[in-house]
Image (cartoon, helix red, strand yellow):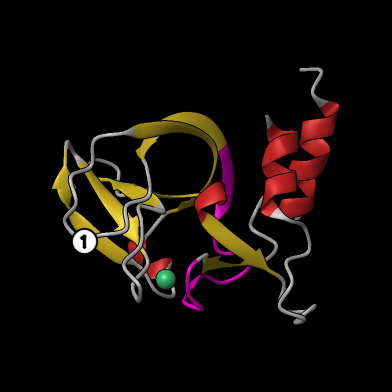
Amino acid sequence: MSSSNNECTVEAMKDSEGMNLDGVYCTHCPSKILNPGSAAFKRFEFPLPLMQYKKGEQIDKKETLEVFWQVDDVMTFENIGVSHKVDNIKYLACADCERGPVGWIDADTQQCYIALDRVKHTSAASDSGRPRQSLDDFLKSAK
Ligand SMILES: [Zn+2]
């Protein structure tokens, strides 16, 4: 591993235990998805359908995402919408505006995953409404 730059950026997103440092919110509305410290950072590749903006629209196109928050139990979420099962996966969307998928539940393990680049991270301490770090910058450096 020689990607020290990437690791520094990831370190800024998680606490010493590898949990999310900031609250996780919907990018389209004020709905809170996760409290700080409730999800574990994971890095792997997973093809997630593109965000859809109409309920029931056919999910066909996917993009491969690489960084996720892992949650052991769907009850951990502050607010989340769960879709019907597709290929042993239940996709997760915002509970309020229904935009998604922002992540998914593995129906076998019941582990939930939220894609970092489908959500907004906001620190409660710096409540200026501005995220500590722009997600665009984070994703750029995570590549
Ligand atoms: Zn929303």
| Residue 103: image location, x then y, percent | 39, 50
Please indicate whether residue 66 sits to the left or right of residue 56 in the image.
right
Task: Inspect the magenta stretch and tell me whether residue 34 lies in it.
Answer: yes
Give the residue at the far top of this rendering.
1
Which quadrant: the N terminus?
A: top right
Residue 107 found in image quarter: top left
Name the residue at 34% across, 61% down.
93
Please indicate whether residue 72 sits to the left or right of residue 90 in the image.
right
Would you name the residue on which mark 1 appears?
55
Question: Is the residue 36 above or below the residue 116 in the image?
Answer: below
What range of the chain is rendered magenta? 28-42
Q: In this orientation, does residue 14 appear?
A: no
> Disc 1 marks which amino acid?
Lys
Residue 100 found in image quarter: bottom left
Foreground pick, 101 / 11: 101
Number of residue marks: 1
Name the residue at 35% across, 62% down.
99
| Residue 140: image location, x then y, percent | 71, 37
Q: Secondary structure at mark 1?
A: loop
Ligand 1: image quarter:
bottom left
Question: Is the residue 57 above or below the residue 32 in the image?
Answer: above
Residue 58 found in image quarter: top left
